[in-house]
Image (spheres, grey):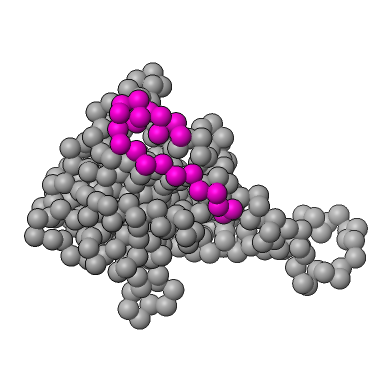
Amino acid sequence: MYFDIPLYMQSGSLLPHYELAYETYGELNAEKSNAVLICHALNASHHVSGNYEGQEGSEGWWSNMIGPDKPVDTNHLFVICINNLGSCFGSTGPMHVNPQTNESYGSDFPVVTVEDWVQSQERLINRLNIHTLLAVMGGSLGGMQVLSWTLQYPDRVKNAIVIASAPNLNAENIAFNEVARRAIVTDPDFHDGNFYKYGVIPARGLKIARMIGHITYLSDDVMNTKFGRTLRRDVQDNKEIKDQKYLYTTQNIEFEIESYLRYQGEKFSEYFDANTYLLITRALDYFDPAKKYNGNLSLAFKDTTAKFLIISFTTDWRFSSHRSQELVKALLDNKRQVTYMNINAPNGHDAFLLDDKRYMSAVKNYFKQIY
């Protein structure tokens, strides 16, 4: 959807015009009371459910959650998912042409924040002639957008579903993001973010960034159960390698966990944009609704009116249960209606994308109560 009204951003920059890619599922009822907005996480897109016809491997990133007879049941609900500004999956971002230069934005694309995304999403919801959202739902970075919706447009959100998220990033999370960003910007092919005109991509940096990120998405239990110290088959029978030069080659993959991480990094570098990665991780770092209240989270949420479902996972150390409990306390301090579940699941942060029966049942039962 194209917008020719300038978007004034928190950084002080503006986008004179822009486009938002989005998909919808199900049908909007006559009262326009069954709309659910799904907010996506870092490397996802607006394609949240189902497959594109004739495109193998095109399954939506939350297909297990959203669709007919699924927890977010599109037999009853009208689901909207919008690709965030600055992304590389259709909405205006660094790869698009800057009208002022007639070249790709590259590093000149404005800094984006969670609040900027929510502002742009609200404009699209207006275009669909929807005033009140039955629910806004998201996991991880998507959960931060949900929180921002309840703060920026409190009268337009009836229910907020926040999964595996936090009211801000702790120092450890910011540190992981910074190491990943340094991997990208120090890649010789980065060219200060203007690599498009050189016909290259900073693939090495993207691979390392993804490997770092992927480590934080998995729990220690999952990594040990799935990989442990298992050696690849082609090195199982190798004797101790005494040639020191071997340690400095780029192809010395011995352990299965090494092979897995390199595969994830390789795949990521083939479809994700480096500038987008920098922008989105910065948006994660900047989000902090309590900042203007001297860190008082309860004061930050004093004007919210939505009902909340908050879900965390015991082995998620990137967005720990403790961070969700901080949010629950802040909402209860304001006498908000909150349903909270801390699910004992082994899958770490990735649990919010997986098929834990307790998790799926909790979401399904919550929606049955509100539609």
Corner quadrant of residue 253 = bottom right
Magenta run includes residue 345? yes
The boundaries of the magenta stretch are 325-347
Toward the viewer: 297 or 46? 297
Seen at 55% across and 52% down, the residue is 345
User: 143 above or below 353?
Assistant: above
Give percent across and percent down for residue 66. Answer: 34, 63
Does 269 sit left or right of 93 as displayed?
Answer: right
Give percent across and percent down for residue 53. Answer: 32, 78
User: 176 above or below 171?
Assistant: below
Give percent across and percent down for residue 305. Answer: 23, 35
Toward the viewer: 32 or 371? 371
Seen at 13% across and 47% down, the residue is 131
Give percent across and percent down for residue 331. Answer: 34, 31
Toward the viewer: 49 or 33? 33
Does 80 sit left or right of 343 as displayed?
Answer: left
Q: Quadrant of the C terminus?
A: bottom left
Corner quadrant of residue 264 = bottom right
Q: Is residue 250 visible?
A: no
Toward the viewer: 148 or 159? 159
Seen at 30% across and 28% down, the residue is 335
Seen at 54% across and 31% down, the residue is 171
User: 178 above or below 88?
Assistant: above
Tell which residue pokes out farthest to the bottom in this image. 54
Magenta run includes residue 23? no
